[in-house]
Image (spheres, rainbow, N blue to C red):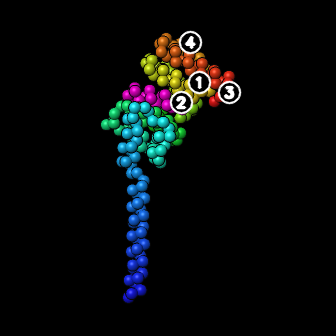
């Protein structure tokens, strides 16, 4: 009988040790709600978060950003910054989210513009056709976002489209941005920097 109690005592002690360890680990790792709260705090700071700050939020930070973007109860500034921060992640989730925002007319213009400005950085030349399709949009703000995307993606096709847009554009702000983008891209090509 005492052997059984000793065996049972060892089993109970082992179970308690596992429960205590898992409780300590659970307290050390933030839950989804805590990660979301911290991410929202980060997005609401005076300056948009840097990549290191976003990545510091740990695994699933990109998933948390997608949740924030999709939550219509979250303020516009936080959702826009979440779209921009999603550009730090070059993965399927971020690519699908950004592409969906750009192509789905249900998204408000402010979010489509943020996604356009971000997608060139994430997808590079893979986003060329999507950006090209919007580069002649009647809205100057959308065209301006396309210029920023083209500069971010770089490459021969982006450079060619910027040159073509330079000849067609009439909005002074967009013309200035095209000129700046072409200057930076040409300078980078001459210097051999990526």
Q: First in sequence: mark 3 or mark 2?
A: 2
Rounded to the nearest angstrom, the CA distance separating label 3 from label 4 is 26 Å
Q: Are marks 2 and 1 in contact (CB under 8 Å)?
A: yes
- Residue 101 in sight: no
Rounded to the nearest angstrom, the CA distance separating label 1 from label 4 is 15 Å
* Few, some or many residues within 10 Å of mark 1 (<14, 14–19, 20+): many
State the SS at label 1.
Answer: helix
Per the image, the residue denoted by label 1 is 158
Q: First in sequence: mark 1 or mark 3?
A: 1
Q: First in sequence: mark 3 or mark 4?
A: 4
Q: Vertical placement of 66 versus 163: above or below? A: below
* Few, some or many residues within 10 Å of mark 3 (<14, 14–19, 20+): few
* Few, some or many residues within 10 Å of mark 2 (<14, 14–19, 20+): many
Per the image, the residue denoted by label 4 is 167
Q: Quadrant of residue 162?
A: top right
Image quarter (top left, top right, bottom left or bottom right) of the N terminus: bottom left
Q: First in sequence: mark 2 or mark 1?
A: 2
Rounded to the nearest angstrom, the CA distance separating label 2 from label 1 is 10 Å
Left/right of residue 88 with respect to residue 40 in the rendered view: right
Per the image, the residue denoted by label 2 is 120
């Amino acid at each position: 009988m005492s052997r059984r109690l000793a065996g049972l005592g060892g089993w109970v002690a082992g179970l308690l040790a596992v429960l205590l360890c898992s409780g300590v680990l659970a307290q050390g790792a933030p839950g989804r709600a805590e990660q979301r709260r911290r991410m929202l705090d980060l997005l609401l700071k005076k300056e948009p978060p840097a990549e290191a700050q976003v990545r510091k939020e740990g695994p699933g930070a990109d998933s948390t950003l997608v949740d924030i973007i999709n939550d219509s109860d979250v303020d516009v500034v936080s959702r826009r910054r979440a779209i921009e921060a999603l550009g730090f992640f070059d993965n399927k989730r971020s690519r699908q989210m950004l592409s969906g925002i750009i192509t789905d007319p249900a998204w408000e213009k402010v979010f489509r513009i943020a996604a356009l400005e971000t997608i060139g950085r994430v997808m590079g030349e893979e986003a060329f056709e999507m950006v090209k399709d919007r580069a002649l949009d009647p809205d100057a703000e959308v065209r301006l976002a396309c210029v920023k995307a083209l500069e971010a993606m770089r490459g021969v096709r982006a450079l060619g489209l910027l040159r073509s847009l330079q000849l067609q554009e009439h909005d002074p702000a967009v013309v200035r941005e095209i000129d700046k983008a072409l200057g930076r891209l040409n300078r980078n090509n001459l210097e051999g920097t990526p």
